[in-house]
Amino acid sequence: MDEDCGSRDWWRNCACCHGKLLYHEFCSMGLRRFIQASYFQCARTSGIPKHVRYKPPSLVQWRHSGSCIYKAVIFDMGGVLLPSPYKLAVEWEVRNRIPPGTIKQALISGGENRPWMRYMRGELTSAEFLQEFGQQCSETANFSVPVDSFLSDLTSSQMAEQLPIMTEAVACIRAEGLKTAVLSNNFYLHNGLSFLPLDRKQFDVVIESCREGICKPDPRIYTLCLERLGVQPKESVFLDDIGQNLKTAAQLGIKTVKVDDPEAALQELETCLGFPLRGFVPHTRSMRPTMEIPRDTLQKYLEEVLGGQKTGPLTVRQFSHGQSNPTYYLTFGGRHLVLRKKPPGKLLPSAHAVEREYRVLKGLAELGVPVPKVLTLCEDSSIIGTPFYLMEYCTGLIHKDPSLPGLEPGQRRAIYTAMNKVLCKIHSVDLKVAGLEDYGKHGNYVQRQVQTWTKQYRLTETHTIPAMERLIEWLPLHLPEHQKTTVVHGDFRLDNLIFHPDRPEVLAVLDWELSTLGDPISDVAYNCLAHYVPSDFEILKGLKDCAVTQLGIPTAEEYFQMYCEHMGIPPIKNWNFYMAFSFFRVAAILQGVYKRSQTGQASSAAAESGGKQAEFMANIAWDFATKEGFRVFNDFPATKPLARSYSTWPRMGVFPRRSYVTLAPSSAAHASRAHLILSPDGLPERAQGLYHKLKRFMDVNVYPAEQILRDHQVSQARWTPHPLLEELKDKARCEGLWNLFLPVETDPEARYGAGLTNQEYAHLCELMGTSLCAPEIFNCSAPDTGNMEVLVRYGTEEQKERWLQPLLDGKIRSCFAMTEPLVASSDATNIESSIVEEKGFYVLDGRKWWISGALDPRCQLCVFMGKTDPDGQRHRQQSMLLVPMDTPGVTVTRPLSVFGMEDPPAGHGEILFENVRVPKENVLLGAGRGFEIAQGRLGPGRIHHCMRLIGYSERALALMKERVTSRVAFGKPLAEQGTILEDIAKSRAEIEQARLLVLKAALLMDVAGNKAAALEIAMIKMVAPAMALGVIDRAIQAFGAAGLCNDYPLAQFFAWARALRLADGPDEVHRTAVARLELKR
Ligand SMILES: Cc1cc2nc3c(=O)[nH]c(=O)nc-3n(C[C@H](O)[C@H](O)[C@H](O)COP(=O)(O)OP(=O)(O)OC[C@H]3O[C@@H](n4cnc5c(N)ncnc54)[C@H](O)[C@@H]3O)c2cc1C
């Protein structure tokens, strides 16, 4: 038997079960059961009142429920599930000395319009009913009848208690997979609520006449009930105490059972359904036809092993989810037992190792770990067809909801503490003493698990999940250095523990199928999964949206600490790694389930959501990986800063300008990607090659073109792109200096871009920033870059083909329309433009302004943000649409200027959207996802803006230095004036500070992800424009009036640096973000 059974068994089991773990089963099973491919190991109790917990079923030989022709059982309420109102009426009449039969007479006579029927149809309020009904009864009785007292008795607590035998019958019916419904002639109370004292969770459908406006025996109400149940009349059984109601049901083809005496009625129902309606044990059902075990030989065996005095009767029920290792609940000789066996048929040699489970349970029990007590292992297949083992059935409480509703904070903490201590106990087991030394391989557990799950994931991959790709690369690089080897449970979670009903004590740890020898910390991390999953998550109820601390539940971090304290070990620094690993494993499992669901056995909706669940888990895993990256980053030893020197080269034009170059020692040439790269010469080889090529291109082609292009911008022809620009674009493209911006994280295979990291591109971006016309020449200019990234990340294949490709080719340009003149758009949730769905189209209306690029004749696409659901959740109201600029109703009404500069030919436009219709397929990612996209669009874009600002500043300082060394005032070069020296010093220091911060942000984004870098991303946007403004302002000052004119790039640099204190969010918003994050630290 192998040690990694935790992973491999799961897959083997599924293979052996012919992939029978259907998706819908998986959804309803919950994570625990699905991970075990639905094999229960031990019985459990929960939520069923003690008095119905166990009643020995009679010795009826039940017909298999597998052959039951019925799919649903429909119950009347009063007189069936609840005590009979007619009996109450009789007693009440006696008590109140009312002539017998008065109430019944009024209830049944008077036709369709009698008060009772109108009340049941919801046509009368209770006050109106009492008045009319009272009058009717008084006429019958010939004196005033106090019917209000009857109604209050009818709704008293005594009448509102569901009959326990019915509760048990309903549980048995549902355990067999049949649906249940209530079909009741019901009424509204004084408070406006209907009288429904039932636990609705027991029923798939509840139909109340007062809500529907129809009463039994009107056939329409039965039809409605059948429709909601999704069954045919002949597939359902109906129980009622009124003959007339049953008659109509029978006429419709529904099987009927009259309820005079509930016990007798249930016996009749049992006969018709073919399975028992008593002796309910949670999570069990009657034996499946294909899973039947021979009772006679089993009984003989039990008599032998349990001692001669233990004799029958033997009853057998099957745990509902025993597809893998079928598990049975037995009662025999007054004992409650659990039998767990291999499935029938041909099995893979090491699959379904019940012997292994028996062994671990036995070994652990001997060392005091609370586990179900195993009694015997039978390897003789002649008894029931396969080997099996027996254990005792444990009773106690199982907490299915990790938020532990109904408990006090102190009690919750005690439960979590008890769970933690038990886990420590498992991990402290002496393998030798327990005889488990060879229960699995020793060492490298996590590494092998990562390999196994990566392999399994690849085998079942249906589409690229970016987070999985990153994790597959990331996890092996961050494996823990030291791993202990202990028994690991493999599926350790709260709902696998049976607790003492009255105190926080774990009586038994269940479900050992995935146990092996491995790294114990993986169990602790797995135990904390629920902390990060929302409470409404389909397969695993989580705690993410619960205020755990207020509830008394330890946070995951505290839980880890608690574990360390109990184990007496130092804190686990890399616990985020283990969380990432656990979620990765779950994501890989979910992907496997999804793949099988696609074989056609699941509904398309379920299959689709399955795919999303794998991605959801992978994203959580990646969040942890980024947190771990952040921690590793913070733990880096302080790096020795590399010297960065700047030299200026003679300009290549008419004006006394200097180009700029950075030189740095080559010692850092092979710096790892996970380190801060302070100088372009520290870049990895390929990026460095690109940098130097770009630098040459700038020197040879871009700087010399600047003045021509600047002059064009103030000419009559300014709204038409200058042909030189297109020429340079072609040239750059031929040299491979094209689309360098797309971060490798968004485009892992470098399908669209150069595959650079954010940090690598940052250095190139700074260089491009030294010239205002450069970014466009390399197809790296905003807003196209942001729009392209959005299309790569969120676009459908069709959207990519139509828009992304021409943008990547530089054939078209685009704009991004969010800001609106009428609302403060620094708060994106304020935007008001409307998007209304209409017959397969979205209709857009609104006014936008400051839309960069909108005036460019090449601009063909507008990424438009508006509201599809103005009343929805604050961040789910917005959607993003792809709007072709030539769509009727799109009018660019005017260009806006920055300090009089219009920035042609791109410009910043005001646009009117009037009744603009675009097909629904033009939505990005889906309706309500606009805010999410806007957020996702920001990270890399900010690095670009800020590095370009550093480029402006470097260029401004280089120009300033050249100017002040060549110009003389008051008898000496300006460079010798004290204030100028001071200005230069300040500028150098400020540029260096800002660059360090931006590079740190870029590095963090690379190693820890955009989310982890949120603080740095906000800080750079706050710091870089202000820094650049200061540096450029000093350069302008040193230039004198020349600095303000169009002969130099300084005035334009200044204007754009100023605009960037507003564009992409004003400074204040970023300062607020920084302060908030800081306060949280
Ligand atoms: C050159 C340029 C290009 C642009 N390009 C585009 C584009 O392509 N697409 C697009 O959609 N938009 C674009 N914009 C618009 C830009 O994004 C918005 O101007 C910016 O988000 C601010 O919105 P607002 O102008 O409505 O200012 P408002 O939201 O009205 O804010 C005004 C001022 O209020 C103060 N303020 C706001 N919030 C806070 C706060 N939390 N705390 C303290 N003070 C606060 C600040 O001082 C802020 O400057 C561009 C702007 C410029 C200048």
Image (spheres, grey):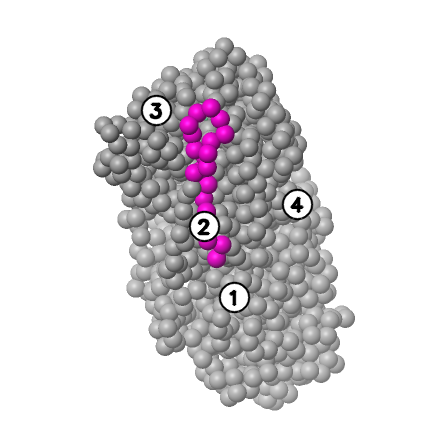
Instruction: Judge by depth and name the residue closer to the eye, 830 or 634.
Output: 634
Q: Nearer the viewer, mark 3 or mark 1?
A: 3
The quarter in which the N terminus is drawn is bottom right
Q: Residue at x 59, y 89 (%)?
A: 307
Residue 603's tag is 4
Real-space Cα separation, disc 2 to disc 1, in angstroms = 34 Å
Return the disc, 4 or 3, that comes first in the chain's sequence: 4
Packing grade of label 1 (10 A; few <14, some 14-19, many >=20) is some
- Circle 2 — which element? loop
On whether residue 834 falls in the magenta region, the answer is: no
Amino acid at the residue labelled 3? Gly
Amino acid at the residue labelled 4? Ser
Q: Nearer the viewer, mark 4 or mark 2?
A: 2
Q: Residue at x 23, y 28 (%)?
A: 970
- Which residue in the protein does label 1 denote? 479
Q: Are marks 2 and 3 in contact (CB under 8 Å)?
A: no
Which stretch is magenta? 648-667
> Residue 898: percent from the left, percent from the top?
38, 20
Q: Residue at x 51, y 81 (%)?
A: 364
Return the disc, 2 or 3, that comes first in the chain's sequence: 2
Q: Residue at x 64, y 52 (%)?
A: 594
On whether residue 653 falls in the magenta region, the answer is: yes
Residue 1043's tag is 3
Return the disc, 1 or 4, that comes first in the chain's sequence: 1
Is residue 895 placed above or below 250 in the rendered structure?
A: above
- Compared across the picture, whether 431 is left or right of 632 comes to right
* Residue 717 visible (yes or no): yes
Instruction: Judge by depth and name the residue closer to the eye, 77 or 822.
Output: 822
Real-space Cα separation, disc 4 to disc 3, in angstroms = 68 Å
Return the disc, 4 or 2, that comes first in the chain's sequence: 4
